[in-house]
Image (cartoon, helix red, strand yellow):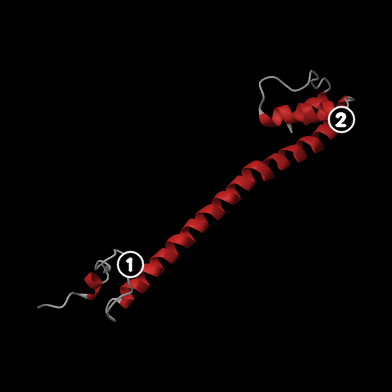
Amino acid sequence: SAQPSPARAAFRPVKKAENSAMVAPHSEADAPAAADESAVAAVADHAKWELLRQLAAFMTFVFFVVPVAVIAIAFIFGVLLAEVEGWSIMDGFYYVTSMLCGLPTPLTTVEPDTDEGKIMDII
């Protein structure tokens, strides 16, 4: 009878004992197939952990880095705008935060009245 090619030998079904439990390969020809299966499982496991790592990095960016950046920028420009307009720092912070987030209704009732304040608002 013809010998199976090495590629087809890797896809031979695993032999089972009478009680249907998995058994070790019976010949040396079956050993590379078992090693290949463990290598494939290791690659799949690595790919799963890599995907989870990337998801964690994305979630950290979306839920931590972006909000911290928005708050920092809103505070810095809010303080500057409050100084120019004569507002409290919180009014400046709320105004800039609502502008950065594109809210249709601002978080505060103040608006820039001076030309310098309007220029700061544009920046």
Q: Position of residue 109 (x, y in %)?
A: 79, 18
Q: Nearer the viewer, residue 102 or 59?
A: 59
Specify whether 32 is left or right of 63: left
Element marked by disc 1: loop
Q: Nearer the viewer, mark 2 or mark 1?
A: 1
Q: Nearer the viewer, residue 64 or 26?
A: 26
Q: Position of residue 113 (x, y in %)?
A: 82, 19
| Label 2 environment density (alpha carbons within 10 Å; few <14, some 14–19, many ≥20) | some
Residue positioned 62% across, 42% down in the render: 62
Q: Earlier in the sequence, mark 2 or mark 1?
A: 1
Residue positioned 66% across, 27% down in the render: 102
Determine the residue located farthest toward the left in the rendered image: 1
State the mark number for residue 8. Answer: none
Which residue carries the number 1 mark? 22
Element marked by disc 2: helix
State the mark number for residue 89. Answer: 2
Q: Position of residue 79 (x, y in %)?
A: 85, 34
Q: Nearer the viewer, residue 49 or 15?
A: 15
**Quadrant including the C terminus:** top right
Q: Quarter of the image holding residue 82?
A: top right
The amino acid type of the residue labelled 2 equals Ile
Marks 2 and 1, how far apart in space? 71 Å
